[in-house]
Image: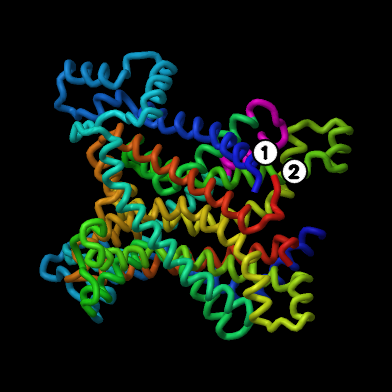
Amino acid sequence: MSFGYLIKRLLAAIPVLLIVSLMAFSFIHIIPGDPAMAMLGLNATPAQVEELRREMGLDQPLLLQYVKWLAKVLQGNMGKSVLSGRPIFQSITERLPHTMVLASMAIMISILIAIPSGVIAASRQNSTTDRMVMLFALVGVSVPSFWVGIISIIFFSVKLNWFPASGYVSIFEHFFQGLRYMVLPSISLALVLAAVSARMMRSSMLETLRQDYIRTARAKGLSRWGSILKHGFKNALIPVVTVIGLDFGWLLGGTVVIETVFGIPGMGRLVVYAIMNRDYPMIQGVILYMAAIYMLMNLLVDILVIFLNPRIRY
Amino acid sequence: MAVEKKSNRFFKSLRANKLALFGFGIIVALLIISIAAPLIATHDPMAISILDRLKGPSSEHWMGTDEFGRDIFSRVVYGTRVSLLIASLVALTAAVVGTLMGLWSGYFGGALDFIIMRIMDGLMAFPALLLSLSIMAALGPSTVNLVIALGVVYLPSFARITRNTVLALRELEYVESSRAVGAGAVRIIFDHILPNCLSPLIINTTVVFGYAILSEAALSFLGFGAPSKASWGAILSDGRDFIFQAPWISIYPGVAISLFVLGANLAGDGLRDILDPRME
C-alpha cells in the first residue's frame, strides 16, 4: 500500500469533517426560537436566559461562534452539559466504551454468521441450503432490531432463563458476568448486519467463482473447496468488508435503540436522555462524535480493502 | 403503442417473478387493510376498558389487550394507516426533493452543484437514526417534523442516483440535438432526462418506503414519533413496560412492521430485476 494514497485519503476526509462540524454546529441554530430559552424552559427569568446566551456565546456573530466552537472542539472541549454541568467530552468518553463493546461484538457475531453462510450458499447455488440462507437474509433485513431484542428477552431471559432479563454489569468490571449481559443485545444487532453481509458474501463469492483464475486453479487439480478457500475467498471478501463499513452507520444508530431496550449505559442512552431533557450542547457533542467515529471507521475499511487487494491503486 | 408494449412486458416479467409478486401482494393487502380499517377492526382502537386490561390473546381479543384494555388487533389495524401514511410521505418527500436537487446538480453543474453535493456528503456522514433523532430534537415533536427528519435522511440517495444518471445522459446525442433545435433546459430535463432516471428512482422509492417504516418505528419506540398517533412503532413502544406481563402488546405490531418491510424489500428486489437490465 502506498503511503501517498493514505495521505490523500486522510486529506480528503478533512472537507467532509468540516461540513459535518458545520452541520453539528448549525444544529443548535435550527431550534425554532431562542435555544437558550428552549433549554431553560418556561419558568426561566430573562436574566437566566441572558446569562446562558452569554455563556454559550449566542450573542456573538454566527461565523465567530462557529470558529470559536470549532477551535474548542479540536482541543477536546465540547462545552458543558446544561443538565449536569459536567464536561461533555468526559461524559462521552465514559459512555463510549460500552457502545464500542456492543458494536464490536455485534460485528464479530455477524461476521461469524455471514461469511460461512454466504460461502456455503454460493458454493451450492440454488440448493435448499442456498434458499434457506437467502430467506434468512431477507427476513433479517426486514425485522426491526429492537423488536428482535424484545422477543429475545421474552424467550431467552423470561422463558428459558438463560440470560439476565434486566440490569447491567459492565464488562470492564466483571468480564464474564458483563459478557452475559451483552450477548442478547449484540445478537439483536448482529442479525440485521449478518443478513446484509451474508447476501453480499454470497453474490460476491458467486462472481469470484466465475473468474478465470478459479477455473485455472481447478484445472491444475485443486479441489473445489481448495480453490474456493485459497483463491476465491480473499477476493470475494472485499465487497463484504466495504458493506460492513457502510453498515457501521446503521449499527451506531442501532445501538441507540438497543441500549434503550437493554438498559446499557452507552452513547445511545446518553443522547436519548439529552434529547428528552433538551440538553442541546450534549446532543451536539454526541452527534459530532458519532459522525467522526463513522468516518474513521470508513477510512479504516478503505485501508483494509487495499490490504486485501493489492491490485487496487488510487 | 410503444408504451403499452413496454408496460405489457413489465407485467409479464412481474408475473414471472413470484417473490416480487408476493412482495407487492403484501403491500397491496396492507394498503387495503388501512383503507378498510373500520370494517376489519373488531373494536374501537381507542375504547378503554379497565376490566379487560392486559388480557392475553383470546377469541374476543385476537391479539390481547394493553394496559388500558384497548384491543391490540384493532390498534394494529388502525396503526397500518398511520405507519403507511408517514412512510409514504417520507418516501415521497425524499424522492421529490432529492430528485429535483439531483436534476439541478447534474444538469447545470457549477457552484450550486458543488454545494448541494457537499451537503449530501455531510448528511451521509451522520448515522441515519441519529440524524433523524437530532432533527426531531431540534424541531420538536410533530408529524410534519417527523416527515422532515426522516425525509432528510433518505434524500441524499435520490439526489446522488439522479445526478449520476443525468451526468451520463447530458452529453448523449438525443439531448444534444434537442438542445440544438432550441428546447429549453426545463423541457430537456423533464421530457428527455427525467424519464430515463425513473427506473432507479422507482426502485429506490420502494426500498426507502420499507426503511421509512423501520426508522419511524425506531423513533416512535424511543418516544420521538408523531405525537398521539398510534403507529405500529408507537404501539410496540407502549408494550415496553409490560414485556414480562403482556408480551403480545409488543409482539404483534413488530410482526406487522416486519411483514411490510419484507414486502417492500421483495418488491424492490423484483423491480430491480425487471427494470434494471444491467442486473440481468
Q: Which mark is residue B193?
A: 2
Q: Which residue is mark 1?
A: B103
Residue interval drawn in magenta = B96-112
Secondary structure state at the residue bearing disc 1: helix
Is B39 left or right of A127, judged from the image as shown? Answer: left
Is A120 left or right of B226, judged from the image as shown? Answer: right
Is B216 left or right of B20, judged from the image as shown? Answer: left
Residue B78 visible at all: no
Label 1: chain?
B
Residue A22 among those drawn in magenta:
no
| Mark 2 and mark 1: Cα distance apart in space | 8 Å
A45 w.r.t. B19: above or below: above
From the image, which quarter does the N terminus of chain B lie in? bottom right
Q: Residue at x 18, y 73 (%)?
A: B55
Residue B111 among those drawn in magenta:
yes
Q: Residue at x 56, y 59 (%)?
A: A241
Return the x and y of residue A250 as percentages of the image width and height.
45, 53
Front residue of B117/B29: it is B117
Front residue of B17/B119: it is B119
Front residue of B39/B73: it is B73
Front residue of A102/B192: it is A102
Residue A72 visible at all: yes
